[in-house]
Image (cartoon, rainbow, N blue to C red):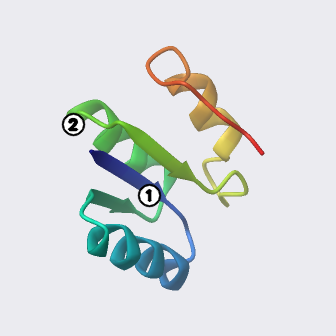
Amino acid sequence: MNVLVIEDEERVADIMTKYLEKEGYKVYTCYTGRSGLDVFFENKIDVVLLDLMLQIFKGKKYVKRCAKYLMCIFS
C-alpha cells in the first residue's frame, strides 16, 4: 500500500514516515501541498495523511483537487 504524508512540520512528517515504513508501507513524504499534489498525480497513492492546516497551500484546497480520485475521511 502506498501512503502519501503531507505535513509541513518536518519533524512530525519524519516520525509518521518512519513509523509507517516500519509497518511495511511504501511512504512518500512531502512538506508542502504543491509537492504533495505532484506526488499524488505521479504515483499510485492509496492513502493520504494530510495536515489540513498547511501554511501556503491549504489542506482543504488539496482535498478539493483530489477528492474525485480518493475517498476522504475526516475525524
Q: Which residue in the protein does label 1 denote?
A: 5
Counting every numbered tag in the picture gives 2
Q: Position of residue 5 (x, y in %)?
A: 44, 57
Please state, as top left, top right, bottom left or bottom right, where the N terminus lies in the image.
top left
Residue 36 in the image: state x and y as whole percent.
Answer: 41, 48
Q: Is residue 17 left or right of residue 25?
A: right
Is 29 above or below relative to 3? below
What residue sits right under mark 2 in the picture? Answer: 43
Amino acid on which disc 1 is placed: Val
Residue 75 appears left or right of 69:
right
Q: Secondary structure at mark 1?
A: strand
Q: Nearer the viewer, residue 24 or 51?
A: 24
The residues bearing labels 2 and 1 have C-alpha atoms spaced at a distance of 13 Å
Is 19 rendered above or below residue 69? Answer: below
Place of residue 7 in the rendered image (x, y in percent of width and height, measured from the top left): 54, 64
The answer to which image quadrant residue 56 occupies is bottom right
Task: Estimate how packed mark 2 is, as few (under 14), some (14 to 19) or many (20 or more) residues with alpha carbons within 10 Å.
Answer: few
